[in-house]
Image (cartoon, grey):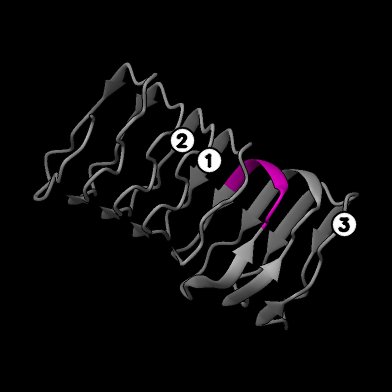
Amino acid sequence: ESFNIPSKITELGYNFNNCPLIRKITIPSTVSSLTAVFGDCGTIDEFIISDGETPLSTNGWFAHNTLIKTVYQGRNCTNIGFESKEVESLTIGDCVTEISYAMYINTPLQEVTFGKSLAKIGSRAFKGTKLKEINLPESLTELENEAFDYCALLESFNIPSKITELGYNFN
């Protein structure tokens, strides 16, 4: 049920699709690229992107038709969009400085905890989520356009004092 990728692996391509028994996945800091992985895996309770300096990117779809409930993002990620429509809880680690474009768009995300190094949230990163409360870290300086648009359940949010670019948000 738990799947740990060995630390000597640096790339995954066209692997681990149709694996309905996997409930927990840990991507080590050595992996820098995912291509068409973890599709049609049923429900994954916990998806962990380990802390690290090397950004993680995807080429092609990622977790297509797979329900992921809890995500820990421990490093910067590019070109990853969680296609899962079940992401409910997210923790952003302290190594993450940027959340990329449309990373969690239209997921039913209800809870997010931001790490203390986050400086930028990309356009549409959390658009259409079910967040009720947003506590942005003081490290945040840039909030791109539509990062939190169409969050219909949003009741409260803070704007950190270091914000220099707010963009068009909270519509």
Magenta-colored stretch includes residue 69: yes
Query: In the rendered structure, which disc, 2 or 3, sits on the residue that comes first in sequence?
Result: 3
Near-viewer residue (119 or 167): 167
Q: Amino acid at mark 2?
A: Val
The reply to whether discs 1 and 2 touch (Cβ–Cβ < 8 Å) is yes
From which residue to which does the magenta span run? 63-71
Which of the numbered marks, if any, corresponds to residue 90? Answer: 1
Which three-letter amino acid code belongs to the residue tagged 3? Cys
53 sits left or right of 123 in the view = right
Q: Is residue 20 above or below residue 59?
A: above
Label 1 crowd bin: few (<14), some (14–19), many (20+), radius 10 Å: many
- The residue that label 2 is drawn on is 112
The secondary structure that most of the magenta stretch takes on is: strand
Residue 136 % position (x, y): 29, 37
Q: Name the residue beneath numbered marker 3.
A: 19
* Quarter in which the C terminus is drawn: top left
Image position of 152 with respect to 79: above or below: above
Q: Is residue 103 left or right of residue 44?
A: left
